[in-house]
Image: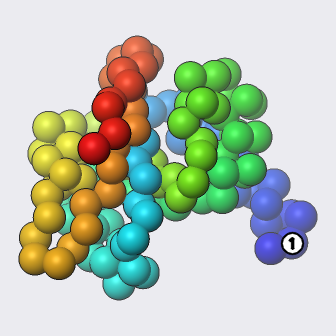
Amino acid sequence: MQKEDKERVVAELTEKLRSADTMIVADYRGLTMPQIDALRGKLIEQGARFSVVKNTLTRRAAEAAGADALLALLEGPTAIAFLESGGDPVAVAKTLADRPGSFPAPTSRSSRSSRRSRSCAAR
């Protein structure tokens, strides 16, 4: 990834972090790309965008956005489900926890709603 691309990703993620009222941080370990794509489709139906970004870029964006609570959660494969206005946080959390068939569920690490952080116990 070129430096300009990294800067663009950090700027976009910084804006998402600043504007998001609700987000859920998850470990997506064990999911294949087709499974992540299927999960993204389900989350879009419920009003959330599932973003997988390198932790170093997410760390830079979190620092720029003042989202210090997120920094402690950036270990291992990390994805963030950003809820859009009108999105259903309960449905999104359930979708992240479901295991339809052989689809391994990502582990929720934390969620934030209305600028408050909530840590979730790992499974």
Q: Nearer the viewer, residue 120 or 50?
A: 120
Dot 1 corresponds to which residue?
2
Give me the residue at 40% from left, 15% from top. Answer: 116
- Mark 1 crowdedness (10 Å alpha carbons): few <14, some 14-19, many ≥20: few
Give me the residue at 34% from left, 39% from top. Answer: 122
Question: Residue 60: x, y in percent?
Answer: 76, 40
Question: Residue 29: x, y in percent?
Answer: 43, 64
Q: Is residue 82 visible?
A: no
Outermost residue on the bottom side: it is: 34
73 vs 25, left or right, is: right
Q: Nearer the viewer, residue 47 or 54?
A: 54
Q: Nearer the viewer, residue 69 or 107?
A: 107
Residue 15 sits in quarter: top right
23 vs 47, left or right, is: right
Question: Residue 65: x, y in percent?
Answer: 66, 28
Rendered position, 15 above or below 10: above
Helix, strand or loop at label 1? It is loop
Rendered position, 37 above or below 78: below
Question: Residue 99: x, y in percent?
Answer: 14, 64
- The N terminus is located in which quarter? bottom right
2 vs 21, left or right, is: right
User: Could you tell me the amino acid type at mark 1?
Assistant: Gln
Outermost residue on the front side: it is: 123
Q: Nearer the viewer, residue 86 or 112?
A: 112
Color scheme of the displayed model = rainbow
- The C terminus is located in which quarter? top left
Give me the residue at 37% from left, 73% from top. Answer: 31
Give me the residue at 79% from left, 66% from top. Answer: 5
